[in-house]
Image (cartoon, grey):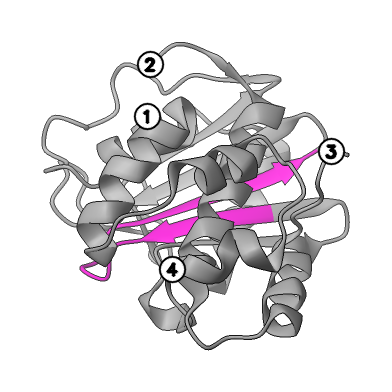
Amino acid sequence: MKPLDIETFRKNCIACAVLDMLCEPEWEIRRFSYDPAWDDNEQMGSWRDGSGCQLFNVFHSECVFVKGINPDSVYGGQSIETGNVPPELLNKIQAEDMHFLEEPAFGKECSFLFTASKKISVPNDLDFPLDKGGLADVFKILTEGIDAYLSDAEAYFERELPFDLCKKIFSFERVTFADVKPLVGRRTWKTIEKELCEIGYSPND
């Protein structure tokens, strides 16, 4: 993976959350989500596959704290609660990010951890070969953007997504009800606007 600036990575997290929201009205079925007001001066994007793999990205200052859970990895689900996290994992995060290990919403296990500053680049020794398409694929989506998302989402939701709409969202352009209507079913524009606001989608224009 080539280094990517943190802001682009953050915006890709938001774009994926927006498109998942447009495709699926039920939050529990979506893979990507984003909370722009996770905590004071913190935002959090997450992903889950429903089979135990999860990814959490906490953005603060010019950094991002990343935690992944993959039961099939070499580290499996090392228990944070019992202090069983290997030093080689802990060494990849900044001291000020240690408190995130105690965050209940991020689960009691971890397979990898790291903190990236200004630019994000996945450490070469992360256990992606055994990832079976889970966390490796989601990092590809979050770093490569629209084409990777489209390929993955169309397979997951079993429907074709309008490329022009996806391009608008990944470019953070303003969207209208006419733009999103092919995806949102019976949901109203008022409902969609509320969810866009909750996700933190702020068009550039």
Magenta stretch: dominant SS?
A: strand
Q: Secondary structure at mark 3?
A: loop
Q: Residue at x 58, y 54 (%)?
A: 45
Q: Nearer the viewer, mark 1 or mark 2?
A: 2
- Residue position for label 2: 1
Query: Which callout, 1 or 2, points at the residue further toward the start of the chain?
Result: 2
Q: Residue at x 35, y 43 (%)?
A: 150
What's the residue type where badge 1 is placed? Answer: Glu
- Mark 4 and mark 1: Cα distance apart in space: 39 Å
Residue 15 magenta-drawn? no
- Residue position for label 3: 204
What's the residue type where badge 2 is placed? Answer: Met
Query: Which callout, 4 or 2, points at the residue further toward the start of the chain?
Result: 2
Q: Which residues are magenta?
A: 44-60
What's the residue type where badge 3 is placed? Answer: Asn
83 vs 53, nearest the viewer: 53
From the top left corner, tell me how far across and down residue 60 is, in percent: 77, 42
Query: Which callout, 4 or 3, points at the residue further toward the start of the chain?
Result: 4
- Mark 4 and mark 3: Cα distance apart in space: 23 Å
Q: Nearer the viewer, mark 2 or mark 3?
A: 3
Q: Residue at x 11, y 43 (%)?
A: 132
Quadrant including the N terminus: top left
Mark 2 touches mark 3? (CB < 8 Å): no
Residue 79 vertical position relative to residue 137 in the rendered view, above or below: below
Q: Residues within 10 Å of mark 3 (few under 14, many from 20)?
A: few
Query: Which callout, 3 or 1, points at the residue further toward the start of the chain?
Result: 1
96 sits to left or right of 144: right
From the top left corner, tell me how far across and down residue 109 is, in percent: 36, 61
